[in-house]
Image (tube, rainbow, N blue to C red):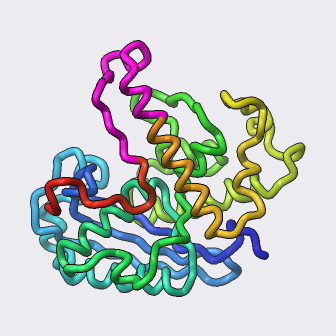
Amino acid sequence: MTPWHLQRLAALDFESSDKDPETARIVSCALILVGGGITTDTRAWLVNPGIAQEPGAIAVHKLTDEHLAEHGQPAEQAIGEIAKSVAEVVVSGTPLVGHNLGSYDLNLLDREIRRHLGDTLEGVCREPISRVIDTMVCDKHAAPYRRRVSEKQGPYQMRTTAETYGLEWVEEQAHGAEYDALQSARAAYRIGAIAHTRPEDRPEWVQRLRNRRGPYDRFNDLAFVDVEELHRRQIGWAREDAASYQAWLRNAEKAGDKHDPDAVIDGTWPLRPIPAGGES
């Protein structure tokens, strides 16, 4: 069996109009088939969402409403093409890879498909989404309890994960869908390479890792499993991480000014049900 990180992977990333996948609109997308000893194949879309974006979103990806209105495809057309391309990847058995893919991007795409095509992501694919490699979920499990790099740079955002695994990060190119998609595929490869290296030969920083469950090297959990099993494991890891964060938020002593006694963090991964109140 070819290790999962050496297989052909389909890197997927979106830039969007806001941070909430329930209300956000896609403004750009990259779907990049990479690895497996085959030439890289890149598809990219620029989308006119037809609504005003949140200023914070524009500050990140630099795609203004005016630029999208002039150069972007109409949303319904673009979503149709993106959905078809993703479905082809899923049906072919090629794993989808991305950073925070299960908690954000796939849910964003599912909501856009519902909104514009009257279907669901799994409906378009005509099968369950069962081969996802989410580098955020894998990184959090393998190297837990990492501290923030700075006030602005979180412990598991794409840049931090990339730099942790020795990838160069060019901020001027970041937050574009193509750049971020490729970086997630590269990070997946680095994570997989460490997992499939003998524990005693893994990088020194990995050997120094200690978690609250003892000295067990969690990279072992990512080694010598097929993609479907890795997907199933990520379901559990995402659920555990959400439960831990929820407990932290409800603890006044630990959470401080972020304390919320009624906090509810949904750990469903990679596709979450439509929240109460219906679609937007």
Q: What stretch is highlighted in magenta?
A: 244-266
Determine if residue 178 is in view. yes
Q: Is residue 95 magenta?
A: no
- For image coordinates 63% across by 62% down, the residue present is 230
Question: Percent position (x, y) of residue 108?
Answer: 30, 63
Observer-nearest of 183 and 212: 212
Residue drawn at (18%, 72%) of the image = 115
Residue 121 placement: quadrant: bottom left
- Please tell me whether the stretch drawn in magenta is mainly helix, strand or loop: helix
- How far across and down, in percent of the image, does residue 91 sit? 50, 86
The image shows residue 205 at horizontal and vertical percentages of 74, 36
Location of residue 220 with respect to 118 vertically, above or below: above
- Compared to residue 43, the image places residue 186 above or below, namely above
- Residue drawn at the location 65% of the way across and 83% of the way down: 38
- Residue 131 point in image, percent of width and height: 55, 71
Q: In which quarter of the image is residue 226?
A: bottom right
Question: Is 265 colored magenta in this rendering?
Answer: yes
